[in-house]
Image: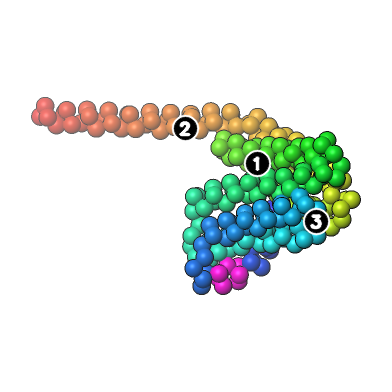
Amino acid sequence: MFDGRFRQQVERIVRPVGQLLRRTRLTPDHLTVLGLVVACIAAVVIAIGELQVGLLLVICAALPDLFDGALAKASNQSSQRGAFFDSTIDRVTDAVLLGGVAWFLGSQRGAHAAVLPFAVMAVSSLISYQRAKAESLGLTAKGGLMERAERIILLCVGLLFDSFLFWAMWLMLVLVTITAVQRFIKVWKQAAIAPATAERAALRQSRRASRRAQRADRRLRLSRGRLMK
């Protein structure tokens, strides 16, 4: 939701930071790895119960992920490889952070509570898969109530208070489930009209191939006529 509505505003804000980082020897991949390292430290801190310190570290881990895109554009280093690497590390970061939350909840509320963050991670992975699969089919699946930015924000709110983290995870689970349903419906509706579009595209290609074959046949006949003369 935030990604769709505020993406351009955020890019304008972080663009000067990207220009400053361009003067260093850092690459976008360096920032991506830095964010992962800080996230791992944040997960350990959250697991031992230092939630407010963990909150600061989660914010610090999110900043490199915010700036790596600005640096890639400023240094003209945007690439499919970089986008793939960044997206993969995002999934790893999410898993690590929720693992730390699971450890904390398990130690505070018992083993059953530890399952909750893993349920959030499972549905979040489904959301990412829906987008990837839709795009591979030529469809779109962006949007929804709880994308990655919203999940990070809600996690930060939950880390403010020890007692609220458990309920923040429940709220996140509900919202990511709604998001998964929203994306499913969105792709389902697009896929309903996609076969007709594919048929029209196939028909156009068939007509083009037929015209090319006719032109080739005419050229062949003309060449044969010239040879006979």
Q: Is residue 133 magenta?
A: no
Amino acid type, mark 1 = Ser
Q: Earlier in the sequence, mark 1 or mark 2?
A: 1
Residues marked 1 and 2 touching at CB (< 8 Å): no
Q: Does the magenta stretch include residue 20?
A: yes
Q: Give the range drawn in magenta.
A: 15-21
Q: Name the residue under label 3.
A: 51
Separation (CA) of disc 2 from disc 3? 60 Å
In which quadrant is the C terminus drawn? top left
Q: Which of marks 3 and 1 is nearer the N terminus?
A: 3
Q: Name the residue under label 2.
A: 204
Residue 26 visible, this orientation: yes
Is 221 situated left or right of 110 in this image? Answer: left
Is 170 situated left or right of 86 in this image? Answer: right
Figure check: 93 above or below 226: below
Q: Position of residue 201 (x, y in %)?
A: 50, 33
Q: Which residue is drawn at 80% across and 53% down?
A: 49
Q: Is mark 1 on a helix, strand or loop?
A: helix
The label nearer to you, 2 versus 3, is 3
The label nearer to you, 1 versus 2, is 1
Q: Which residue is drawn at 33% across and 29% down?
A: 213
Q: What element carries label 3?
A: helix
The single residue placed furthest to the left in the displayed view is 229
Q: Position of residue 219 (x, y in %)?
A: 24, 32
Q: Which of marks 2 and 3 is nearer the N terminus?
A: 3
Q: Is mark 2 on a helix, strand or loop?
A: helix
Q: Mark 1 points at which residue?
A: 128
